[in-house]
Amino acid sequence: MKKIYLIDGNSFIYRMFFAIPEFKTTDGVFVNALFGMAKFFVWQLVKENPDYLVFIKDAKWDNFRHLIYADYKATRDRMPDNLRTQISLIEEMITKMWFDIIEIPNCEADDVIGTLAESLWQDKNNDIYILSGDKDLYSLTKENVKIYDTMKWKIYDYEMAKTKFDVPAELIIDYLAI
């Protein structure tokens, strides 16, 4: 079996930024999110040893949903400047660890994750783990596609996702929309 990790990049970057108190280098560069990401990757890789790890980011600018609905995410706060300055450092670190970073123009990370998971699950030699806090992604669970909740260190397969939401995985998005 090939163990494949699909990581919701922006979700992780934000989580690390807010989970770890801000601190900076002697040069005044904020590095709390970078530190959190480095610690996570090193610990996770030693513990789990995935065969492939893909870090998937939201596209920088508007995506196709903005064309459908102009106010899409209009109330969302702007990325904090102290986090914005760490993004290039985080990407440099990930690249130096030889992981792929995927950012598709006009797409959010969860759309790319969904596309990859739907494509990769068909090969039953793939064991796919989606690392994200996004509830919508539980709808992708199948026999070889699981959600890895790194907050609780719990892995949700199809049956566990069904139990968590009280509906089959293929209905989770509809359930959350209600």
Image: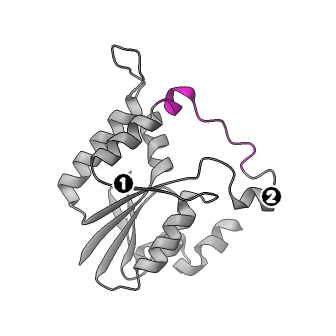
Residue at the spot 28% in from the left edge and 40% down from the top edge: 39
Neighbours of disc 2 within 10 Å: few (<14), some (14-19), many (20+): few
Judged left or right of residue 176, residue 122 is left
Displayed quadrant of residue 92: top left
Residue at the spot 75% in from the left edge and 45% down from the top edge: 74
Kind of residue sitting beneath label 1: Thr
Q: Nearer the viewer, mark 1 or mark 2?
A: 2
Indicate which disc, 1 or 2, sits on the residue closer to the N terminus.
2
Q: Which residue is mark 1?
A: 150
Residue at the spot 54% in from the left edge and 62% down from the top edge: 110
CA distance for labels 1 and 2: 32 Å
The C terminus - image quarter: bottom right
Q: What secondary structure is the stretch in magenta mostly built from?
A: loop
What SS does tag 2 mark? loop
Displayed quadrant of residue 170: bottom right
Q: Is residue 54 magenta?
A: no
On screen, residue 64 above or below 81: below
- In the image shown, does 90 or 155 lie closer to the viewer? 90
On screen, residue 5 above or below 99: below
Q: Position of residue 10 (x, y in %)?
A: 50, 48
Neighbours of disc 1 within 10 Å: few (<14), some (14-19), many (20+): some
Q: Which residues are magenta?
A: 73-85
Q: How many marks?
A: 2
Kind of residue sitting beneath label 2: Tyr
